[in-house]
């Protein structure tokens, strides 16, 4: 087996990935760092790759779960209509990763490169589609505070749902 072509696989952060909220951008950056670390350990040696995977995968899954919980909490608080679909995407991803870890533990065929490519593609696609969609909604609803941060209050939500249903315009 040959080592992965790292240069073409590594992802560096760019503003196109930004969803506009620092906490979430920081978590996404960390996820991309984890992916890059995995690519950097695709050395073409099965034993080495398996050892590295075993060493880092549980912390990585924990981090992913924290990130998903952060997003889901914000979505719930803001009554986002796409919340359940988004949550389902998160759950399906965790399930796939858990299945791959299980296959790994059972000694089934496993390649770190294939796993990491899957991870990278999922993360980038999910940020570009599902996450962006939610954060566009968030930015519409939220109020920018004097320190530049976005926050959502109960009033923001009431105002937003009222304007959406046309009540505000009718008064
Ligand atoms: Fe998400
Ligand atoms: Fe995300």
Image (tube, helix red, strand yellow):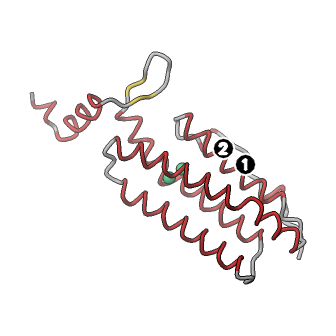
How far, Cα to Cα, is label 1 from label 2? 6 Å
Q: Residue at x 89, y 70 (%)?
A: 44
- Furthest toward the top, the residue is 146
Q: Are marks 1 and 2 in contact (CB under 8 Å)?
A: yes
Within 10 Å of disc 1 (Cα), the crowding (few <14, some 14-19, many 20+) is some
Task: Give above or below for 138 relative to 66.
Answer: above
The image quarter in which residue 117 lies = bottom right
**Left or right position of 65 against 46:** left
Within 10 Å of disc 2 (Cα), the crowding (few <14, some 14-19, many 20+) is some
* Residue 120 percent coordinates (x, y): 67, 59
**Left or right position of 93 against 52:** left
Question: Residue 112: which numbered mark, if any?
Answer: none
Quarter of the figure with the N terminus = bottom right
What residue does disc 2 label? 29
**Left or right position of 59 against 40:** left
Q: Residue at x 49, y 45 (%)?
A: 70
């Amino acid at each position: 087996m040959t080592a992965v072509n790292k240069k073409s696989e590594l992802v560096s952060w760019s503003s196109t990935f930004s969803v506009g909220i620092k906490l979430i951008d920081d978590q996404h950056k960390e996820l991309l760092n984890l992916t890059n670390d995995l690519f950097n350990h695709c050395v073409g040696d099965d034993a080495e790759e398996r050892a590295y995977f075993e060493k880092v995968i549980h912390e990585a899954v924990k981090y992913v779960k924290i990130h998903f919980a952060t997003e889901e909490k914000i979505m719930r608080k803001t009554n986002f209509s796409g919340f359940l679909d988004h949550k389902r995407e998160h759950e399906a991803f965790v399930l796939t990763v858990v299945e791959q870890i299980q296959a790994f533990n059972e000694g089934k065929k496993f390649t770190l490169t294939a796993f990491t490519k899957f991870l990278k593609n999922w993360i980038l696609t999910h940020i570009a589609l599902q996450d962006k969609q939610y954060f566009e909604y968030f930015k519409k609803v939220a109020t920018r505070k004097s320190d530049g941060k976005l926050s959502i209050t109960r009033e923001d939500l009431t105002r937003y749902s009222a304007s959406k249903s046309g009540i505000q315009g009718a008064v």
